[in-house]
């Protein structure tokens, strides 16, 4: 991997074949052909083997050559949480779902989705404290579920980063033009290209590149800007809540359940995505001064406050105006206009614009750190793992996500693509809960094989029963007979883990409470929300997963296999040196 003096002599700005494909399998065509001939053997090795904490924390970090700077604290992380999560979702989705599905009970929809998000936050927090690296869920899944599961997560993370960033940037343009009292497409360039690609958006591409440039300079400087933007957004939110309750009419809360419980959960599946983005905080563990203290405060603190804020904003809206009269596109703006505060429309638009700005800023940070650790493992070329010696930031990883995202934002309206990304997030959250169960109840070389088989059977039952509950909800809304089968199976499988299996590992500092119940509930809720998505979503997920697997078989499995063999050689060499030191005679 090279000595420190070698690293100092190398320029950061280098683009040789060795930087992109240093593995033995890609030395030449003959070596690549030989690697392909061993694909079956190598694939088996990668599927069955798991990484470990030492590999993630020590060996893979060396691939970056320079360390990221530890300069963030819990205060930074709380504001990063606000900046990453509070975007346009709360302003757009609340009125839409209150009008169409939940009525005044939209408040309970936010409570239900907030609980689901918090369960995932618990899982992320334990992993981020125990394995404080930039890879987030990718690194955690490599340790607990193996290379293949982590690779599928990595592919979805990169896809979400590119498409999701482009979608937010296109939305930024729309809100900016609205704030100027102009048509949303007035700043876009009209062309003769195909429908959906005929409105070029250079402003969206520009704001993505600007956010990336800020993120590249320094994580701490980005934090300062995030504080300012988030403070403005918070002030707007406080105004919305206070002004809303000042014009509240309790009679607007009747009837509270116009669409019954079915509508509440349908709305919960949609507004859940207003909580997305918190996983970016976990990727900053490597740059946090005291991750054991700061990560739990930052993640749990920000998400708890955000849940309360969302519920208060939803309640103020449905008390200010009857749910039947809410505008599904601009609920808050029209509601304020109807109570004689037309000027408040500009504050709401400003809040949404600031929210999207911080989402782009924090997203540029978090997505680059995901990409950095993926590159450290050699699943993508390790060139993208390099950290700049002066800025302490992964410039190449940032550009790898930003440039394709800017191109997509420039050409595509993303109306369909953006709506199909939700399944990736829920799938990764579900796998994180599974990984936590595996971490607590399985330890390689210690757990008896019989217990491993029991754990695998119970986890599969939890997933299957959750899928059954979700499917029955979608097919037989209003029925209850199916739940008498699926829910007891879920309960029995979770109870079986709790009663029949001992926990093999206790958290060192902070851990998820009520294991296995909370991780099992997180699996059930994420699978349930996945089941509420459209069939087109799963077609996209299936096609993308197939493309990812083809890449993995042709490139990823060979690069990671070579990297794993290199780490084994280094580990054996270090152990031999340590043994030699122990047996050296005392003079």
Image (spheres, helix red, strand yellow):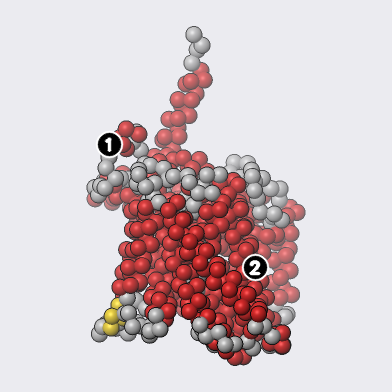
Q: Residue at x 48, y 25 (%)?
A: 578
Judge left or right: residue 402 versus residue 341: left
Q: Residue at x 28, y 83 (%)?
A: 190
At mark 2, the secondary structure is helix
Task: Tell me where residue 408 sits by quadrant.
Answer: bottom left
Picture layout, residue 469 above or below residue 225: below
Q: Residue at x 61, y 78 (%)?
A: 243
Q: Position of residue 391 (x, y in %)?
A: 37, 47
Q: Name the mark on residue 512.
A: none
Q: Are marks 1 and 2 in contact (CB under 8 Å)?
A: no
**Which residue occupies the foreground of this view, 45 or 488?**
488
Q: Position of residue 553 (x, y in %)?
A: 38, 57
Q: Quadrant of the N terminus?
A: top left
At mark 1, the secondary structure is helix
Judge left or right: residue 30 versus residue 370: left
| Disc 1 from disc 2: Cα separation | 52 Å
Judge left or right: residue 58 versus residue 30: right
Q: Which residue is mark 1?
A: 9
Q: Residue at x 67, y 75 (%)?
A: 108
Looking at the image, tell me whether mark 1 or mark 2 is earlier in sequence order: 1
Q: Which residue is mark 2?
A: 308
Q: Mark 2: give few (<14), some (14-19) or many (20+) Cα within 10 Å.
A: few
Q: Position of residue 220 (x, y in %)?
A: 45, 51
Q: Looking at the image, can residue 210 be seen?
A: yes
Q: Mark 1: give few (<14), some (14-19) or many (20+) Cα within 10 Å.
A: few
């Amino acid at each position: 991997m090279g000595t420190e003096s070698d690293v100092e002599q190398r320029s950061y700005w280098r683009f040789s074949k060795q930087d992109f494909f240093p593995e033995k399998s890609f030395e030449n065509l003959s070596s690549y052909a030989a690697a392909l001939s061993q694909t079956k053997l190598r694939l088996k090795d990668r599927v069955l083997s798991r990484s470990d904490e030492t590999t993630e924390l020590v060996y893979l970090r060396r691939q970056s050559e320079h360390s990221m700077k530890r300069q963030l604290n819990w205060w930074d992380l709380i504001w990063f949480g606000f900046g990453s999560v509070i975007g346009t979702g709360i302003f757009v989705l609340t009125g839409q779902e209150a009008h169409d599905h939940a009525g005044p009970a939209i408040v309970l929809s936010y409570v239900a989705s907030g609980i689901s998000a918090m369960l995932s936050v618990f899982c992320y927090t334990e992993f981020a404290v125990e394995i404080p690296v930039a890879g987030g869920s990718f690194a955690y899944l490599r340790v607990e579920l193996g290379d293949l599961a982590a690779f599928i997560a990595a592919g979805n993370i990169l896809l979400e980063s590119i498409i999701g960033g482009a979608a937010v940037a296109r939305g930024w343009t729309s809100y900016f033009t609205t704030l100027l009292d102009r048509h949303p497409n007035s700043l876009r360039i009209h062309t003769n290209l195909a429908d959906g690609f005929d409105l070029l958006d250079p402003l969206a591409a520009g704001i993505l590149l600007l956010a990336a440039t800020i993120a590249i300079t320094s994580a701490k400087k980005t934090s300062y800007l995030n504080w300012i933007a988030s403070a403005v957004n918070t002030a707007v939110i406080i105004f919305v809540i206070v002004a809303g309750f000042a014009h509240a009419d309790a009679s607007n809360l009747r009837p509270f359940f116009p669409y019954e419980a079915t509508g509440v959960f349908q709305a919960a599946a949609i507004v859940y995505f207003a909580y997305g983005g918190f996983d970016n905080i976990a990727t900053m563990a490597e740059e946090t001064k005291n991750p054991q203290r700061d990560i739990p405060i930052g993640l749990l603190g920000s998400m708890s406050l955000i849940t309360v804020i969302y519920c208060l904003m939803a309640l103020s809206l449905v008390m200010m105006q009857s749910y039947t009269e809410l505008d599904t596109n601009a609920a808050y703006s029209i509601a304020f206009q109807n109570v004689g505060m037309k000027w408040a429309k500009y504050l709401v638009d400003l809040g949404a614009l600031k929210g999207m700005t911080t989402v782009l800023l924090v997203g540029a940070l978090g997505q680059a750190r995901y990409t950095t650790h993926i590159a450290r493992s050699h699943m993508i070329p390790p060139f993208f793992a390099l950290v700049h010696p002066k800025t302490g930031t992964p410039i190449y990883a940032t550009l790898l996500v930003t440039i394709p995202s800017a191109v997509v934002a420039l050409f595509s309206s993303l109306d369909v693509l953006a709506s199909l990304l939700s399944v990736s997030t829920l799938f990764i959250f579900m796998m994180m809960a599974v990984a936590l169960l595996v971490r607590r109840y399985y330890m390689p070389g210690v757990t008896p094989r019989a217990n491993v088989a029991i754990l695998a059977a119970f986890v599969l039952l939890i997933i299957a029963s959750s899928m059954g509950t979700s499917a029955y909800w979608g097919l037989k809304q209003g029925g209850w007979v199916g739940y008498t089968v699926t829910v007891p199976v879920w309960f029995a499988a979770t109870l079986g883990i709790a009663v029949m299996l001992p926990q093999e590992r206790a958290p060192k500092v902070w851990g998820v409470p009520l294991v296995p119940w909370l991780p099992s509930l997180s699996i059930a809720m994420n699978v349930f929300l996945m089941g509420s998505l459209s069939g087109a979503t799963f077609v996209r997920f299936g096609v993308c997963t197939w493309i990812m697997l083809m890449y993995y078989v042709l490139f990823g499995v060979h690069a990671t296999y070579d990297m794993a063999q290199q780490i084994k050689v280094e580990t054996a060499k270090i152990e031999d040196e340590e043994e030699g030191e122990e047996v050296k005679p005392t003079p």
